[in-house]
Image (tube, rainbow, N blue to C red):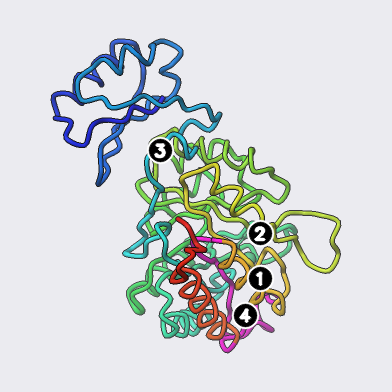
């Protein structure tokens, strides 16, 4: 259940509610909010009647969380989650942009790309040091050396770093270097990894699995949230369908569908979502229009030489164009009196 408190509820009154929950063996969490605090208490209705809690001073109302996603669901929260990654707010009405090459390949490649990413006013750099590749014979990433180069790029260009953790064994190292840890599509149901990410102090970007339903994706989110990490962002990156014109099918309808069910921000990755450079910019524009909280995009200083995902990497010129167009679409939709982008 979600316990809504009066705006002026005192610390003592909040304490009384928490004491009652604790005496019933219920784990609860206080959400501070600008308007009024609330207490999320998943599964409390199994042991306590709502009117018992509503009788306590300072309590305004008890709302049942009927959703199976007790922590991710919109009805279990009084406000939308906003995740702060090195000063970039993801959620809350802005358009967060994260861009960079698929993988860290060399200092020259990373720096050349990071330089124009920063020039475009994008302040979060993405690049994998550990790469999940379909073939074991493909480039697997530079590993720890890649993380070191990412740290260097942060210092050089003042960019926040988003990079993938592929397993529990290397999570600590990735966590130390990253400003946001990515859980890749193929790891969406790696439950040990999800739980480890849930114990991290760093924000987490959770990609949708290539064949995952929205329900499965939200249950995966629940694993992270359940360990205490509330700084979680979802990212749609395309699913496997019968289409043969693109690497994946970018499921843009999942953005409003997810946002109706969860308070978590939802980003879109049109690069893996299409796998084709010529489709990335149009789909990025559409993602903004459908209400995505941000975009994760691959761009490379020399895509023809890329060691992974070259065909989907935007050229610098396309990238500048995409940033400009997406920001403009976002501005227009946000400023329209009809409020097309409702957050
Ligand atoms: C990536 O972001 O480069 C990546 C491997 O993504 P995904 O997990 O979506 O395939
Ligand atoms: Mn990639």
- Select label 1 or label 4 by which is in front: 1
Q: Which residue is mark 1?
A: 283
- Select label 3 or label 1 by which is in front: 3
Name the residue at 25% across, 20% down.
17
Picture quarter with the C terminus = bottom left
Relative horizontal placement of residue 60, taking residue 335 as reference (left or right):
left
Q: Nearer the viewer, residue 152 or 324?
A: 324
Q: Which residue is mark 4?
A: 314
How far apart marks 2 and 1 lie (CA) works out to: 9 Å
Q: Earlier in the sequence, mark 2 or mark 3?
A: 3
How far apart marks 4 and 2 lie (CA) works out to: 20 Å
Q: Which residue is mark 3?
A: 77
Element class at badge 2:
loop
How far apart marks 4 and 3 lie (CA) works out to: 38 Å
Disc 3 residue lies near ligand 1 with CB under 8 A = no
Q: Earlier in the sequence, mark 4 or mark 3?
A: 3
Q: Mark 2–mark 3 contact, CB under 8 Å?
A: no
Name the residue at 31% across, 11% down.
52
Tell me where residue 327 appears, x and y as whole percent: 48, 76
Q: Mark 2–mark 1 contact, CB under 8 Å?
A: yes
How far apart marks 1 and 4 lie (CA) works out to: 13 Å
Magenta-highlighted residues: 291-317
The answer to whether residue 45 is above or below residue 257 is above
How far apart marks 3 and 1 lie (CA) works out to: 31 Å
């Amino acid at each position: 259940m979600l316990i809504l408190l009066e705006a002026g509820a005192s610390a003592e009154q909040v304490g009384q509610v928490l004491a009652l929950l604790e005496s019933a063996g219920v784990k609860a969490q206080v959400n501070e909010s600008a308007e009024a605090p609330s207490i999320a208490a998943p599964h409390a209705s199994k042991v306590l009647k709502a009117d018992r809690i509503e009788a306590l001073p300072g309590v305004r109302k008890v709302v049942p969380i009927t959703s199976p996603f007790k922590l991710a669901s919109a009805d279990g929260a009084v406000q939308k989650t906003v995740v702060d990654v090195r000063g970039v707010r993801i959620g809350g009405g802005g358009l967060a942009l994260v861009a960079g090459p698929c993988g860290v390949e060399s200092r020259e490649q990373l720096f050349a790309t990071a330089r124009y990413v920063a020039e475009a006013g994008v302040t979060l750099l993405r690049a994998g040091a550990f790469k999940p590749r379909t073939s074991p014979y493909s480039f697997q990433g530079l590993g720890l050396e890649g993380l070191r180069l990412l740290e260097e790029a942060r210092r050089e260009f003042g960019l926040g770093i988003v990079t993938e953790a592929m397993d529990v064994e290397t999570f600590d190292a990735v966590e130390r270097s990253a400003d946001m840890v990515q859980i890749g599509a193929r790891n969406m149901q790696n439950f040990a990894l999800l739980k480890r990410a849930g114990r991290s102090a760093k924000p987490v970007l959770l990609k949708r699995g290539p064949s995952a339903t929205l329900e499965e994706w939200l249950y995966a989110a629940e694993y992270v949230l359940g360990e205490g990490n509330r700084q979680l962002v979802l990212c749609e990156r395309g699913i496997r369908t019968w289409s043969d014109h693109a690497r994946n099918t970018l499921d843009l309808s999942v953005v409003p569908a997810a946002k109706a069910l969860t308070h978590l921000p939802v980003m879109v990755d049109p690069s893996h979502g299409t796998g084709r450079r010529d489709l990335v910019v149009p789909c990025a524009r559409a993602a903004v229009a459908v209400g995505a909280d941000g975009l994760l995009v691959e761009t490379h200083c020399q895509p023809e030489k890329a060691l992974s995902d070259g065909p989907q990497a935007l050229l610098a010129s396309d990238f500048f164009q995409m940033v400009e167009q997406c920001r403009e679409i976002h501005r227009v939709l946000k400023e329209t009196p009809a409020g097309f982008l409702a957050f």
